[in-house]
Image: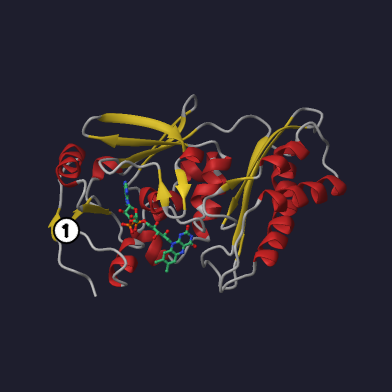
């Protein structure tokens, strides 16, 4: 049952930030409602004010610049990202991730800002975007700050958002030369949430040696996790089966999974191992052919 609340619908970002400042201790933001309404219906979240930002068209955009990369507004829907020719061309991994995220119905309503702000460690976008070295812009009536997305997640369903802040923009830098990114989630039902997911971004030099690697795990801990020991295994090395095995083992060691109704801790560690090997190989081969 959903408890009573006062519904507020700002017409502009400025108005939304002012409402948020006025009601910060007793309000909740709603955008597409795809995650929020579930917890409200379950009675897990009760709020006095609901501020609906879905209609803030000024936050619905995808801009691209060769120097700065992508700037995506927070209320941009998954479907808009999935069908963007510019994203398909410059950042194909994002389109591939979106195609496997829920159903078209959910993607038509759900937004990139809502997905990231929800803070679900099984979300697909955060690990992929962290592998892409993304930043997130947060605004309040007092001003704005931009932080690495990697620093945004603090605990299970907890983020660095202050009570008076909104996610306003996602900033993805241009892909470096000879770099590719791949993401795969393991699930039992097609397009369902990840039981475990692995995103791998690999940069190689002209001789095929790994210059840089960013590996990020989903649903293998309370937040998206950088598999930093696995990254160290790869940097400075050439692609080889034995190297992939070592990286998979290191990533499994970097993970902090728990057992739940979907999978045991041991099985999740095994999945991290397997998916890391596959995603590193895929990204590496794509980088070699880029
Ligand atoms: C059936 C189903 C399947 C799904 N499968 C997947 C999946 O496979 N992979 C995956 O990653 N996700 C999946 N999801 C989650 C889905 O992607 C998210 O529900 C959706 O993206 C959230 O966006 P929203 O705009 O609907 O957010 P809302 O539900 O409106 O809000 C979610 C949370 O974010 C906050 N919020 C929203 N926008 C902002 C903002 N701009 N600034 C600050 N806080 C904000 C809200 O207060 C709330 O806490 C699934 C959801 C459903 C219902």
Decide if residue 203 is on the left or right side of residue 14.
right
- The residue closer to the viewer here, 18 or 288, is 18
At which x and y percent is residue 95? 51, 51
Identity of the residue furthest to the top in this view: 67
Figure label count: 1
Residue appearing at x 22%, y 71% in the figure? 2
- The residue closer to the viewer here, 155 or 115, is 155
- The residue closer to the viewer here, 195 or 90, is 195
Secondary element under disc 1, as helix, strand or loop, is loop
At which x and y percent is residue 218? 57, 54
Query: What residue is disc 1 on?
Result: 48
Task: Give the quarter the ligand 1 occupies.
Answer: bottom left
Q: Is mark 1 within 8 Å of ligand 1?
A: no
Residue appearing at x 71%, y 41% in the figure? 229
At which x and y percent is residue 5? 15, 62
Q: Quadrant of residue 38?
A: bottom left
Label 1 crowd bin: few (<14), some (14–19), many (20+), radius 10 Å:
some
């Amino acid at each position: 049952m959903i408890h009573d609340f006062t519904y507020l619908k700002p017409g502009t970002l400025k108005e939304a930030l002012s409402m948020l400042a006025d009601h910060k201790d007793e309000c909740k933001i709603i955008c597409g409602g795809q995650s929020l309404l579930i917890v409200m219906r379950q009675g897990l979240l009760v709020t006095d004010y609901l501020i609906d930002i879905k209609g803030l068209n000024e936050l619905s955009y995808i801009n691209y610049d060769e120097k700065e990369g992508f700037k995506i507004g927070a209320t941009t829907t998954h479907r808009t990202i999935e069908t963007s020719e510019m994203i398909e061309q410059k950042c194909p991994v994002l389109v591939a991730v979106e195609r496997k995220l829920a159903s078209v119905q959910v993607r038509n309503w759900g937004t990139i800002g809502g997905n990231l702000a929800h803070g679900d460690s099984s979300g697909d976008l955060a690990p992929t975007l962290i592998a892409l070295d993304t930043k997130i812009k947060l605004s309040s009536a007092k001003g704005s700050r931009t932080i690495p997305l990697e620093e945004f997640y603090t605990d299970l369903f907890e983020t660095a958002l202050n009570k008076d802040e909104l996610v306003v923009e996602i900033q993805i830098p241009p892909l470096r030369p000879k770099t590719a990114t791949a993401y795969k989630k393991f699930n039992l039902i097609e397009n369902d949430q990840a039981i475990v997911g692995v995103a791998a971004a690999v940069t190689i030099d002209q001789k095929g040696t790994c210059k840089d690697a960013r590996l990020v795990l989903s649903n293998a801990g309370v937040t998206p996790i950088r598999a930093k020991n696995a990254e160290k295994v790869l940097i400075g090395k050439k692609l080889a089966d034995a190297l992939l095995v070592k990286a998979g083992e290191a990533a499994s060691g970097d993970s902090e999974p728990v057992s739940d109704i979907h999978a045991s801790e041991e099985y999740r560690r095994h999945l991290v191992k397997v998916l890391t090997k596959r995603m590193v190989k895929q990204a590496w081969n794509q980088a070699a052919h880029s």
